[in-house]
Amino acid sequence: MDVPASTSKSLRVAVLADSDTRWKWGALTANRIAPAESDIRLDGYLLRGRATPTARQLQEVGVRADSLREVTGVEFLRTLREAEYDIVVLALVGGAVQAMLHGLGHAWQERAASKGSAKRPVVVTGYVGVVYEKLADGLLLRHGADLVLANSRQDAERFTAVYEGVGADASSVTEVALPFLGGDSYEKHDPYTVVFAAQPSVPESRKDRTYLLERLVKHARLHPDREVLLKLRSKPGEHTTHIEEQPYQKLAQRLDLPANFRLVYGHMGDVLDRTDLLVTVSSTAALESLHRRIPTVLLTDLGVRESLGNHHFVGSGCLASWDQLDAGHRPTPDEEWVARQGVAADGAYETAFDAARTRIAELLDKGELPSLAPYYTPVTAPGYLPGILARHHLAPDGSPLPGAPAADTEPGPVRQIVRRAARGAYRHGVQRVAPVIRRMGEL
């Protein structure tokens, strides 16, 4: 019996990420934006640094890759100079995206000079969630990628306005949606379950975080028939996209917790499967919850402020306080607002990535693409760009600086132990020592 030949096209994709959340976003995005009928080989690269995911965090994210390894920025550039990829997804903070764009541009120019071919991958970047701060700064640091993904219609309009406003090419802005939305539509559970989605850095102060924890515990006592869960992002000592200086776990140790109150970890989607009311300050989990039509609240107890990020939800119909929730308030989201945020609760989610797939297919069909052309150059930003590149051990032209940390081989056992110890010491310094020094400075 003849076996029909596969019609799928093999596609090699590299994802470079610098935290657990960005790895999740980058890997899921790679699968969402790949042209239809593609057979994807996904290679993951984790940028070595403060927030490099631990094995536990990677397992919790639940996204699999064909290969996964930790690299420095210069190691990644060296790999990409030689490796043949179709798509590269940069799931990084803005400064790191800009450094990699310049570094990749230099690496691929070198490859073209040595091999006589200017063929390069399609480069994609974007944001892992709601964009509520440093809009212009973060966007311009991402300019130069072939696709800058906007997670909603509102973001696409804002991104385009910023690029056009500085005279930069805005054709890279492509509207999509958050890649991790999904799951079953809401149905009431027994027992009724309230989930508070904690964030590592919002709010920041011990006082505010203690207040929110105490209100959550109070809600559990007021409603003994409800299950009240505190959904945590990381365990003490682990780092995520943002630094957590006052872990809720430690604050909770000082409280007398009722029997219907629990701390939980795990995949956010699994927790939402049993959620009747999602409460947070400004977490992207709110959009995941709204997508499923789960009653969702953005807290106003600490104000509606840009520093908290809950100002992004003005007009959503979901802003409320703990006093209102204790009294039984259930929010009703504004459908027009929800639709503008890329939350396709109407079932249109499956088409949200069509424009990106089409764009990438067109670029792949072109063969050789023009050189990467970021807005920031030594001419347009001579007092800003060199510092960004230097932090990633790159010269102003994108070439590796002498003595940049890179390796052609995997580190030996001794080097791995030293590296783990050094990273642990660094994390201890950031999480334990730095806050103490800051407090001393406030005396």
Image (cartoon, rainbow, N blue to C red):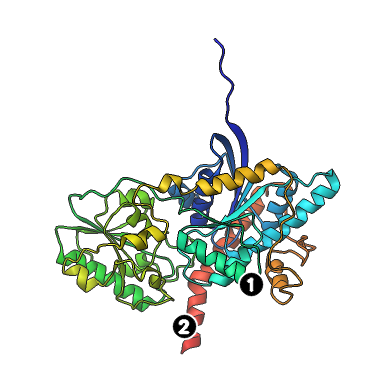
- The residue located at (56%, 64%) in the rendering is 160
Q: Quick check: marks 1 and 2 in contact, CB under 8 Å?
A: no
State the residue in front, 359 or 275.
359
State the residue in front, 308 or 76.
308
The residue that disc 1 covers is: 166
State the residue in front, 36 or 231.
36
Tell which tag, 1 or 2, sits nearer the viewer. 1
| Quadrant showing the N terminus | top right
Residue 275's place in the image compared with 437, above or below, is: above
> As shown in the figure, which amino acid type bears the numbered disc 2?
Arg
Residue 115's place in the image compared with 209, above or below, is: above
Q: Is residue 403 visible?
A: yes
Q: Is residue 186 left or right of residue 95?
A: left
Place of residue 133 in the rendered image (x, y in percent of width and height, measured from the top left): 49, 72
Place of residue 15 in the rendered image (x, y in percent of width and height, measured from the top left): 59, 49
Q: How many marks?
A: 2
Q: Is residue 86 visible?
A: no
Kindly report the distance in space between the C-alpha atoms of the residues bearing marks 1 and 2: 40 Å
Place of residue 347 in the rendered image (x, y in percent of width and height, measured from the top left): 36, 47
Place of residue 321 in the rendered image (x, y in percent of width and height, measured from the top left): 26, 72
Residue 44's place in the image compared with 138, above or below, is: above
The residue that disc 2 covers is: 439
> Which residue lies most toward the bottom here?
443
- The residue located at (46%, 58%) in the rendering is 152
Q: Secondary structure at mark 1?
A: loop
Classed neighbour count for the residue bearing mark 1: other residues with Cα under 10 Å, few (<14), some (14–19), many (≥20) = few
Disc on the earlier residue, 1 or 2: 1
- The residue located at (33%, 57%) in the rendering is 290
**Residue 265 shows which numbered tag?**
none
**Splitting the image into 4 quarters, where does residue 74 fall?**
bottom right
